[in-house]
Image (spheres, helix red, strand yellow):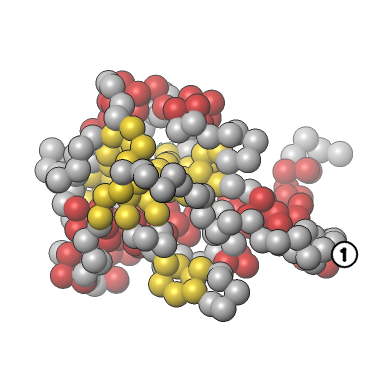
Amino acid sequence: MGKYDNYRNFLKSNFTEFKTIKTDAKKGISQPPKVKPYEINSKLVDLPMVNESTLTNGNIYTCIKERRSTRFYSDKPISLEELSYLLWATQGITSTNKAGLTFRTVPCSGATHSFESYLLIRNVEKIQKGVYRYLPFEHKLLFMFELDELENKIDAITLDQPFAPNFANKAAVLFIWSTTPYRSEWKFDVTAHKKILIDIGHVCQNLYLASESIDAGACAIGIYDQKLIDHLLGLNEEEEFVIYLAAVGKK
Ligand SMILES: Cc1cc2nc3c(=O)[nH]c(=O)nc-3n(C[C@H](O)[C@H](O)[C@H](O)COP(=O)(O)O)c2cc1C
């Protein structure tokens, strides 16, 4: 057996195997919460209604054509309207069904949406610097905590970046997506994990295109310190852990 075999098999269609598995969903075990709960007395930040007028370029063709991973940002802040739009574009709920499934601006296998969006906010108008979580049902931000030496922490989290060292510490916002795998495992059991990875790719691509449409740039970040960021966000690493990051700033 070659050293890559297991990893390659993970990439293949596993639908035949899946059909034979008695998943928790098929066993009648109730579906886990669709989003992470939060304390009722938390500090919430209202986000403006998403409005097409926020876009400086509404032409999908040019947004796709011009999109590049952007690692150099100006000091211009992102407005609250723009942040609201970026959050909506990446995880916004556009409808729900009778079973309570959420349908969002991004596709997701089985509409299981296993992600939470955390933000390290550095340079957004009307918002104090710090760590936040997006609440997609409420379309609000949950303020989590302030962070001393934010830029240094971002450097530590994003490790040695090969293209542009420490670029993320100049971003207006660092998006940090965690996954709670059981939301997908409940439905897809051991075949969930390939789907989770594909799902998060859709999320980040929407961030790239939405950023392009507001004269901002995004850069995906797969090089990060897993333990450091999970610890910083206070995640229970077995149930929920960070899967992907992206920096965004004005060009
Ligand atoms: C899964 C993934 C992880 C990535 N991780 C990083 C990263 O840690 N640092 C970085 O500077 N760019 C990262 N990138 C951006 C790629 O380097 C970039 O997409 C590639 O060079 C092609 O350039 P383009 O996006 O401008 O077309 C990542 C992209 C993807 C899809």
Left or right relative to 25: residue 249: left
In the picture, the quarter occupied by the N terminus is top right
For this orientation, the residue located farthest to the front is 41
Relative depth, front residue between 130 and 177: 130
Q: Residue at x 78, y 35 (%)?
A: 3
Question: Does residue 18 appear anywhere in the picture?
Answer: no
Left or right relative to 171: residue 32: right
- For the residue marked with disc 1, what is the amino acid? Thr
| Horizontal and vertical percent position of residue 201 | 49, 54
Give the image quarter of residue 165: top left
Find ligand 1 in the image and state its quadrant: top left
Determine whether 201 is above or below 223 in the image: below
Give the image quarter of residue 210: bottom left
Determine whether 248 is above or below 105 in the image: above
Determine whether 69 is above or below 32 in the image: above
| Horizontal and vertical percent position of residue 143 | 32, 41
Relative depth, front residue between 35 and 175: 35
Relative depth, front residue between 187 and 161: 187
| Horizontal and vertical percent position of residue 89 | 35, 62
| Horizontal and vertical percent position of residue 221 | 42, 39
Q: Residue at x 50, y 27 (%)?
A: 231
The residue that mark 1 highlights is 20
Left or right relative to 164: residue 48: left
For this orientation, the residue located farthest to the left is 76
Q: Residue at x 58, y 56 (%)?
A: 33
Q: Is mark 1 within 8 Å of ligand 1?
A: no
